[in-house]
Amino acid sequence: MRRSQGTGKEVARLNLLAETLLGGVLVGAIYSLVAAGLSLIRGVMGLVNFAQGEFMVLGMYLSYWAYTLWGVDPLVSLLAVALVLFAVGFLVYQILIERVIVGPPIAQILATFGLSIFLANLALFVWGPEYRAISGSMASGTTTLLGVPLSVAKLIAGLGSALVCALLYAFLKYTRFGKAVQATSMNRTSATLMGINTNRINAVTFGIGAACAGIAGALISNFYYVYPGVGSVFINMAFVAMIIGGVGNVVGAFFGGLIIGVIELLASVYVDPVLKYPIIFGIYFLVIFCKPKGVFVR
Amino acid sequence: MTKRWKIALSVLVCFAISVSVPGAGVTAPKEVVIGVISSLSGANAPQGRDVVDGHELAAEIANGYYEIDLPLARGTGLPNLGGAKVRLVIADSQGSAEVGMAEAERLITMRNVSAIVGTNQSAVTKTVSQICERYGIPCVNDTSTAPPLTQRGLQWYFRATPDDHMFVGDSFSWLKDLNKAKKAGLKTLAIINENTEFGAQIAEVERTAVSTQGFNLVADITYSPGTADLKGEAMRLKNANPDVVMATGYTSDAILLIKTLKEVDFAPKIFLGHRGGYALHEFVKALGNDSNYICTTGVWAADIPETNKTAGAINELFRTRTGRSLTSESSRSFTAMLALLEAVNRAGSTSPDAIRKALLATDISASQLIIPWSGIRYDPKTHQNLLGGGIVTQIVGGEFRTVWPFQAASRDLVFPLPSWSSR
């Protein structure tokens, strides 16, 4: 009897751990996708895109309105949202970033920071300070995985983010254009001398980065509230993921996001929820001091 | 005497009369300028907007003529100031204590406001009231409930809303009434709160109350507001399995917590929010049916107009202006603003000192209010309204309905909270 009680407690403990780890991996995958776009942009053109969170918000609103106005499920409109965000990113580069990319770093920071404030307030002006949420979409309800109860929307978002990160990696590794992006990231001058149109590479990269954020926004709109200021909630985590993974390293950003997600949930469940951010940012500082190029860079 | 001399003498005589007769030559101000500070952007914008909508309606009631039994309604403008109109100057705190402080200074020094009303966040009220104290400008607080705000010995700060001691006290009275009258068997309790002034102060009051009220605290969770994920917090609640969850948070966290509790499939017997995000229409709108059966402390419910005709009339005016019904936030901000304007009218002056004296002499009866308070009378020392009161509401069909005090309840409490799978 006592033994069966002990086994029961052990099972409960293991279930809690499994739920924590799985939950952490799924939310971490979202951070990964936002961070991958951020890292790609930073790696290729040396620019920190503070507006990445606002691109994510734009993706959320596009999904929300497509669902509310025309009944198009966020999973169906996903590709269209990605394309729109790519176009937005491409245009933002042509109109704004191209002008500051050759300027001093402070000009670049102010440009993307200003863009972030502009987009957040534009969203507030256009859509108002109202919290919205999608309900009854294809990705709703709960399921169990390895005996752990999970939200279907979060499961799809986590798997979707991982898939997009994998596609991004394959694109960079195996396509001609991807190799040109990598070459630009490694040495811009040499890439230019080799005949690569680095300005075009920049514009497309910025578009891809924005599309990553847009896809993340579309995926989380299934289970998260939609609000103009929601970008700032995720962008901080994405920055930490990027630093842990190593700036410019898409694979590193992916694993950085997963690490952050798992640590966040482990800290909430086993330490104290109020300490989760101090722990995460403590790790961030540790990485900055000990491995400034990221933990995945040899 | 030439014509020119006659004119000069006449002007001199007129001037002499004007300075010798008391009151003559002093014209009543054409308008009374009141500053309003609220969070109109950032995560708390919905709450801030709701609160300001209440202020604006109160100013409209004072400025226009309305056949309603409220102070200043039957008449245009403030009669004791020659019908002067009220003009509100609205400032955005962005939810930041520092920005709120800067805005208070700007309103006082550049916009010459006679008083400031606000704010919807205790942390912002703390700094704004200090600026008002420094400049000697009345600061009337509408919805901040942190108890220490009235314990600082400030001379210019007045609070119309009841504080957390009263709201938390109500919560425990309700739980004990449920145990007594309905044999609810509620024993264990969990606290979950965000860690700004608002959540931290309520949690502090709750911790003290739990043991003295005979309940067992099984989880005490604090989190940072605006967090990306509340899954760990929800799992802790599920693990502790309390009968009652008492939650304090602003809109985004309130929505996220309920969504996450559904995800981890945990429904306590009672989920009680302490106003903030839990008392707003945005909470109901964003969650839809998942907001049903959540309870909150407050001062407003959809059934109040059924027993208070004045409240019904004001609610209709509010709906016409905003498309929404009043909430515990907007009904309190409306009340605080109208009580201030009533004091300004009694003062018969826009001088901050006269307004302060009039505020101290405020004595508004329950029949002149739209919310279930016994009246408004400020404590001469702390300046806390001594006659405030509260109710407990439950969301049913998207509307806040009174469930306590039992004699004021328009329907029975849905108890226990139905499981997520049975909805």
Image: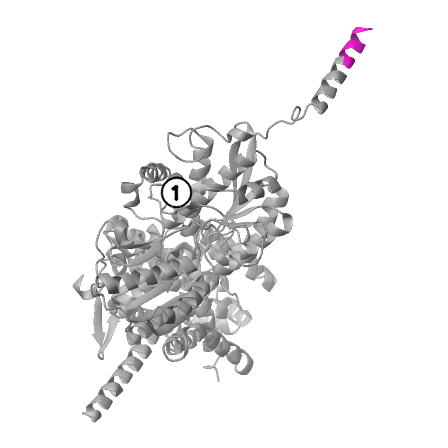
Please give the range of residues in magenta.
B1-9
Magenta span: chief secondary structure = helix
Which chain does the residue under circle 1 lie in? B
Image-based side of A22 in relation to B363, left or right: left
As shown in the figure, which amino acid type bears the numbered disc 1?
Ala
Residue B87 visible in the current orientation: yes
Q: Position of residue B128 (x, y in %)?
A: 56, 53
Q: Is residue B189 left or right of residue A48?
A: left
Q: Name the residue under label 1.
A: B366
The residue shown at (58%, 49%) is: B156
Residue A82 point in image, percent of width and height: 34, 60
- State the image quarter where residue A132 is shown: bottom left
Indicate whether residue B337 is drawn in magenta. Answer: no
> What scheme was used to colour the molecule?
one colour
Would you place residue B368 above or below residue B293 in this image?
A: above
| Looking at the image, residue A123 lies above or below residue B211 | above
SS class, disc 1: helix
Q: Is B6 a magenta residue?
A: yes
Rendered location of residue B252, percent (x, y): 38, 59
